[in-house]
Image (cartoon, rainbow, N blue to C red):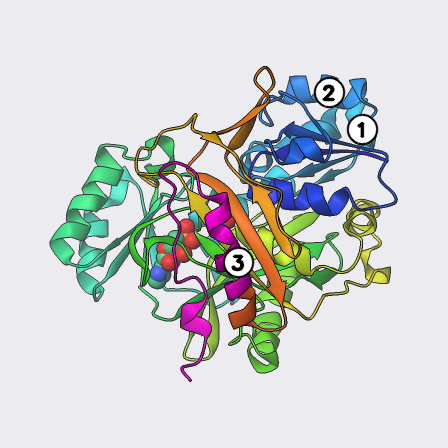
Amino acid sequence: MNILLLGSGGREHALAWKIAQSPLLTRLFIAPGNAGTAGLGTNLPVDPENFPLLKETVMGNRIDMVVVGPENPLVKGIHDFFLADHFLRLVPVIGPRKNAAMLEGSKDFAKRFMVRHHIPTANYRTFTPGNAEAGFAYLESLNPPYVLKADGLAAGKGVLICDDLSQAHREFSRLMFRGAFGKASRKIVIEEFLSGIELSVFILTDGKTWKLLPEAKDYKRIGEGDTGPNTGGMGAVSPVPFADQDFMNKVITRVIQPTMDGLLSEGIDYQGFLFFGLINVKGDPYVIEYNCRLGDPETESVIPRLKSDLVPLLKAIADRRLERETVEIHPETAATVMMVSKGYPGSYEKGTIIHPPPPPAGILLFHAGTLLDPYAGQIISNGGRVLAITHLANNLPKALDGCYQSLPAFAFDGCYYRKDIGQDLISPK
Ligand code: AMP
Ligand code: GLY
């Protein structure tokens, strides 16, 4: 079959790498892809949010299935666009419809959903310019730190954690009245701060049944020791040692199953990947957020641990027969470290020429923000997060060692990476 994968990050390179191994694949297209995906299929210069152009692309290349990597096309309704089109409706889209992608597209929607279905999450209230006064009062009723969230998509930057009340008041006004995140912050969720370790749990679902994928831990802050501003993610490990059977049973019975039952009972269809951003509060899982897609860089650790062919699983989602499939997982531990541009997550330069060598045996190199210059044949940086290096080994220290030993060979001008990925999960000797 011919598959079109949408997106251009490390997540999409990892997905392309996995899809390209399937005997069911005829041709793989990636829109727009990056320099890494160019070696696995055909990159097409098509914006995943340009639905009419996607239609031409799908028809022109006889695409049999579309796999959506990032959230924006889903929240904008790409799946609904396909279903509403006479020609496209027979081409399955892996990724939820707009009303289900709202779980990521609106924090307020997600919170209300969780409350309706008794899914553990931080206490919260939602405010708009009409009841902003009550927002200030609500902040006063909470203990620090204060968590403020823009309701809509804000490219991972819509959450502010404020240490004191006056800062929280200032940020609340800035979001609400000065539209710090544009439309995304016309509604603001204020919630209780939860203290614990975070992890990312992923499932595949066809709307009826679901299958668990390996969980992962992401490292969101730019600085070592989890300091400095949030990024898209600086590294990941999978599995997560504290996500033992007992904890995962709680995740399943308190979070995953009630979410799936809730979607079904509300008539919200969901075909695709669902990402539970969880926090472990004294052994109990709470939902920080839902995402309607896989995580990045978690995917670069999770997908290499998937032993099963991904394509039959995606097809089973499309055909709603996931129940009959099994998901086999490699028992090894995966570690991923992101190499980023100087200045990221603030302003950074693009266009640096990079020369990543062929990865040594056992190392997986996933491109994130890279571009192939077709004229010069050179690879150039095209984003904050540039390369992701993954290594699998029998245990976490070995997975990290393998990763870190190989990293210097991939260094480029001004690159930065965290040297402490996974360290918090290694028990002191
Ligand atoms: P989100 O975009 O909702 O994942 O939030 C971004 C980050 O903010 C999360 O990964 C957490 O580190 C942090 N965060 C969000 N909500 C809370 C909360 N209620 N308590 C503590 N930390 C939070
Ligand atoms: N790494 C977190 C995310 O993809 O949202």
Q: Is residue 50 magenta?
A: no
Residue under the image location 83 percent in, 50 percent down: 312
- Residue beneath the point at 68% across and 27% down: 81
Residue occupied by mark 2: 57
> Mark 1: few, some, or many residues within 10 Å (few <14, many ≥20)?
many
Which of the two discs, 1 and 3, labels the residue nearer the N terminus? 1
> Which amino acid type is marked by label 1?
Ile
Q: In this view, does 410 lie to the left or right of 253?
A: left
Q: How crowded is mark 2: few (under 14 residues within 10 Å), some or many (20 or more)?
A: some
* Coordinates of residue 156 in the picture (x, y in percent): 41, 44
Quadrant occupied by the N terminus: top right
Under circle 3, the secondary element is: helix
Q: Nearer the viewer, mark 1 or mark 3?
A: 3
Residue 170 figure quarter: top left
Separation of marks 1 and 3 at Cα, in angstroms: 36 Å
Q: Is residue 368 above or below residue 374?
A: below
Q: Residue at x 51, y 64 (%)?
A: 400
Q: How crowded is mark 3: few (under 14 residues within 10 Å), some or many (20 or more)?
A: many
Let me know if residue 423 is in the magenta part.
Answer: yes
Question: For the magenta stretch, what is the residue range?
Answer: 401-429
Q: What element carries label 2?
A: helix
Instruction: Say if mark 1 contacts mark 3, CB within 8 Å.
Output: no
Q: Nearer the viewer, mark 3 or mark 2?
A: 3
Could one spot residue 230 in this view of the protein?
yes
